[in-house]
Amino acid sequence: MDATDSWQAPRIWRFLLAISPYVVAPLCRLEVSGDVPEQLRRGPVILAANHVSPFDPAVLAAACHRVGITPRFMATGGVFRAPLVGAIMRRCGHIRVDRNTTRAADALTDAAKALGENAMVLVYPEGRIGLDPMMWPERGKTGVARMAAAANAPVLPVAQWGTHAAIPYEAPKRLGRAVVTAMLRRPVVRVRFGVPIDLSAESGTGPETGGARAMRATRLIMTAIDETLAPLRADEMGMPKVIDHSRPHDMSRVRPRQLLP
């Protein structure tokens, strides 16, 4: 496919990206580091990000605008069912994910089509806001690895930290109080674009099943997100300094990590 056939971000999405820094600025002080290599900007590429707060999509939109990219977000079906927000999401070209339904596989098909159009696709490999008590990325789903293999697309890790100090897990419950508190404190929120992940060793054929290769590629992706995240929370590698008491803990998907002391 040549560049003239590539996906072009709709005007409404470019507008929303442009105003996103002004939306997040009253609630936090955003710091963005790293960049997207020039050779990846033409797509296709998968941005794989950790997920710590309901505030993440707005912060990631602002960070993407700062580095000059317009990815298509993969988002839960509940967002698309909201009367106004859902219509905007569809107009922007974002990709619906109906988890735990018979339509769940449609998201991978839609993402593969987007990547085939040389788009950037931003996805949360954990498939939910992570519930690791120390707030490191939990075990990822294999969907990102399968998308990368099917589209022969590189994966770029993206890490964010501090959004939980602005908007807690329980939002939209008690959202008004959280917003006022965030506006008074304006916590620092950091986003870092990492180094592209080499998944070439997991893309070949061989005696292993595709599922085994996808699981190993998923571990590489999550480790790369860990490594991208570590500098953002260098002084809180263990328990976070800000505790989100509304966040439940789930040990079932906690991963072993070598970054922790």
Image (cartoon, helix red, strand yellow):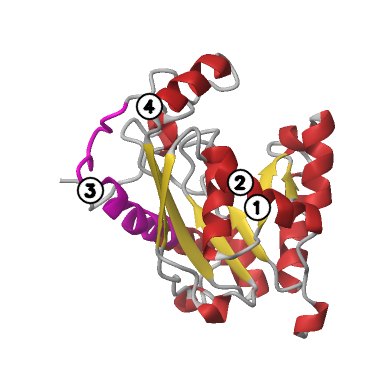
Q: Is residue 154 above or below residue 185?
A: below
Q: Earlier in the sequence, mark 1 or mark 3?
A: 1
Neighbor class of circle 3 (other Cα within 10 Å; few <14, some 14-19, many 20+) is: few
Could you say whether the residue bearing mark 4 is in a helix, strand or loop?
helix
Write down the region rendered in magenta: 221-242
Q: Earlier in the sequence, mark 2 or mark 4?
A: 2
Q: Which amino acid, mark 2? A: Ser
* The magenta stretch spans residue 236: yes
**Rounded to the nearest whole Å, what is the CA distance between mark 4 and mark 3?**
21 Å
Depth check, mark 3 against mark 2: the one in front is 2
Q: Which residue was labeled with disc 1? A: 17
In the foreground, 235 or 18? 18
Q: Is residue 255 left or right of residue 42?
A: left
Q: Which residue was labeled with disc 4? A: 185
Image quadrant assignment for residue 195: bottom left
Q: Earlier in the sequence, mark 4 or mark 1?
A: 1
Residue located at (48% from left, 32% from top): 27
Marks 3,2: beta carbons within 8 A:
no
Q: Which mark is residue 20?
A: 2
Image quadrant assignment for residue 255: top left
Q: Which residue was labeled with disc 3? A: 234
**Rounded to the nearest whole Å, what is the CA distance between mark 4 and mark 1?**
24 Å
**Rounded to the nearest whole Å, what is the CA distance between mark 2 and mark 1?**
5 Å
Marks 2,1: beta carbons within 8 A:
yes
**Rounded to the nearest whole Å, what is the CA distance between mark 1 and mark 3?**
29 Å
